[in-house]
Amino acid sequence: MAVSVPLAVDVEDMSFRYPGNDVVAFSHFNLQIPKGGRFGLFGPNGAGKTTLMSLMTGLLTPAEGSIKILGQDAQSKSVRKLFGFVPQDFSFYHELSPVENLHFFGAWAGLSKIKIRQRADELLEILGLTDVRDKPVNKFSGGMKRRVNLAIGVIHEPGLLFLDEPTVGVDVQTRHAIINYLMNINEAGTTLVYTSHQLSEAEGLCQQVALMETGKICAQGDLDILFKEHNSASLEELFLDLTGKDYRD
Amino acid sequence: MQKLWATIIKDIKILLRDGVGLLLMFVMPIILVIVVTNIQNSTFQAVNKNRLPLLVCNRDTGESSKQLIEAIDKLGLLKVSLLSKNATRAQIGDAMKDKDAQLAILIPASFSANTKAKAKNASNKALKSFGLQGDSVKNVVIKAESLTLYFNPVIQESLRFSVQGALQSALQLVESRQTLRTLYFAINEKQLSASLENEMLSNQTRLNAVPVLKDGSRAVPNASQHNVPAWTIFAMFFVIMSLSGSVVREKVNGSFIRLKTLPTNYMVGLLSKQITYLVVTLVQAAVIFSIGIWLFPIIGIPALNLPSDLTALFFVTLVTGWCAVTYSIAVGVFAQTQEQANGFGAVSIVILSAVGGLMVPSFAMQGAIKTTSALSPLHWSLEAYYDLFLRGGNLSDVVANIIPLLVITLILQLVIFLGLKRKNLI
């Protein structure tokens, strides 16, 4: 008797095309991401990672099929309390301080004032932003802004966290701090769905991966098994083996 | 409610940290209202109190030209300065530049002779119509040489027409006097006494100018009553420079994307912006009105008198502010960049102001432009303010102007909603 694994993300027979664009971004696409793991989505530029992330977070609506997030329709309003999103861009108010940003986004996430205060203090401490908690973010370095971006995404302690290149452009120390934090929240039960071009970093973080190419999955599974199947020593080698060495943009 | 409050706090903090935005919303309109009112007040005083300079080149040596100059001086509108009688047209032009005079008049050498001849003709005709024998001299057709009025092309047409009208009445007086004297002499064979002449020529019915106010008072409007409401509206609509940019920034820097993934509708964000900036427009109006009331008299500009119906004033200001905020958000929703929002925003407000009658009164507009003015929300705001500030109206008087303003606002709200929906932002 097959044991059904609880899913964090269940994309079923999904099709999508950008309005006014003849090219179909996804056609009858399927993807299952188990709950509790650390899942990496990789592929060259134009593979459809960010589009898929936008579909999973409800920013885009599929034309056909369904996307379920922790058992709920990705388009429903109630599902938004369940997941967090850390976009690649710095998606916050640069005129405000980290604590002001956390208070605002915490309120929009539906947290109480007390909970916001508690979570803000906690996150600023963990991510090393306590000393600059009241300074406007527009004075911050790229690494500090990345940490603010991450803190906002997890203010409401989501069960599932989508991360779109969360460490791009940061120094080694910040990358280390961010990855450490992500490992910790994953241990505490948060499912991570992560995209990045930093394949060495991803190799250390992800347990399972899906390699994408023009809206299709060309390989998916546990990293160790994929390495064995494709006789690859690293994720980068596997990536190049499956997606080729030609430029994509 | 907590979400809305948190959003309002966020918007206020961002607004207070936007120094340039605050400058554009408060300092610039204040400077504008002071400068424009001061200039208009000076113009008013120049025309009504200080007299416009008029250069006179009198080539005539007779009596009539002297009487004409005297009559012009007595009008009270023009300050006469005499030029050399031999001045050429070029020299008159130079003198206008040197003496900073916008107007000059050239009286031809034949003026007195022509006036006398015309009077003689008229007198003869009159005597004949009475059945009396006129002068034996035959009536001749007099080809009178015109007086020439030189004017600086920059002078407003309306002002030039006023001056022309005044000069014509002075000329009429001189010609009438001459005709009267000639006729009197022909009948009585003696000179008309100065007292009788003055009585006959000056005994005119006076024309009193009385402003028509709805509250029955007779307060004469001044430059402040005209300008402060108009430029307050302009200032309120100028929140577009800060607000539309704020909407675009939110879209461009990705905050929208994150907000869309949170369990709160973006309409909360728009409601917050409307409340925050509506308060800003009310503060703007309060500051500008306060300056009109208390600062203007100190710097020599007539004080602004608030309307008697303060509830109506608040209501008009509230609806105007809401319309200004709604228009700004609509521009922000459709603009792709901050440059687009600022450029379109500023130019569109200037156009809407011009069409709406802030720069040239709507009643002076003709044809299509006059019809177009009804599409400008600034027109309805201005009419409502004028009802209160100039015509002494109350709340019931402004309703007719408030309804179109509310309709425009609601249409813009719908446009915002559809725009956000089309862009998949709500």
Image: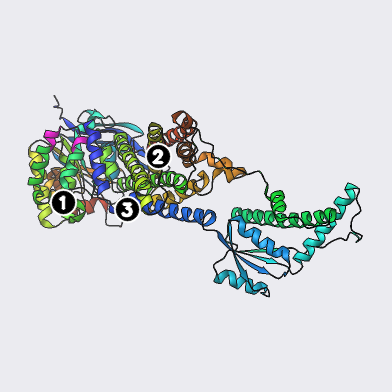
The residue labelled by disc 1 is: A135
> How far across and down, in percent of the image, does residue A194 sit?
19, 44
> How far across and down, in percent of the image, does residue B143 sit?
82, 63
Residue nearest the observer in this picture, B162 or B282: B162
Q: Residue at x 69, y 61 (%)?
A: B67
> How far across and down, in percent of the image, does residue B90 sit?
64, 74
Q: Secondary structure at mark 2?
A: loop
* Same chain assignment for discs 2 and 3: yes
CA separation in Å, label 1 and label 2: 44 Å
**Eyeballing the image, is B132 above or below A73?**
below
B348 horizontally vs A160: left or right? right
Q: Amino acid at mark 1?
A: Lys
The residue labelled by disc 3 is: B23
Identify the mark at residue B88; answer none if there is no mark.
none
CA separation in Å, label 1 and label 3: 23 Å
CA separation in Å, label 2 and label 3: 26 Å
The answer to whether the residue labelled 1 contacts the one labelled 2, judged by CB atoms less than 8 Å apart, is no
Let me know if residue A217 is in the magenta part. no
Q: Amino acid at mark 3?
A: Leu
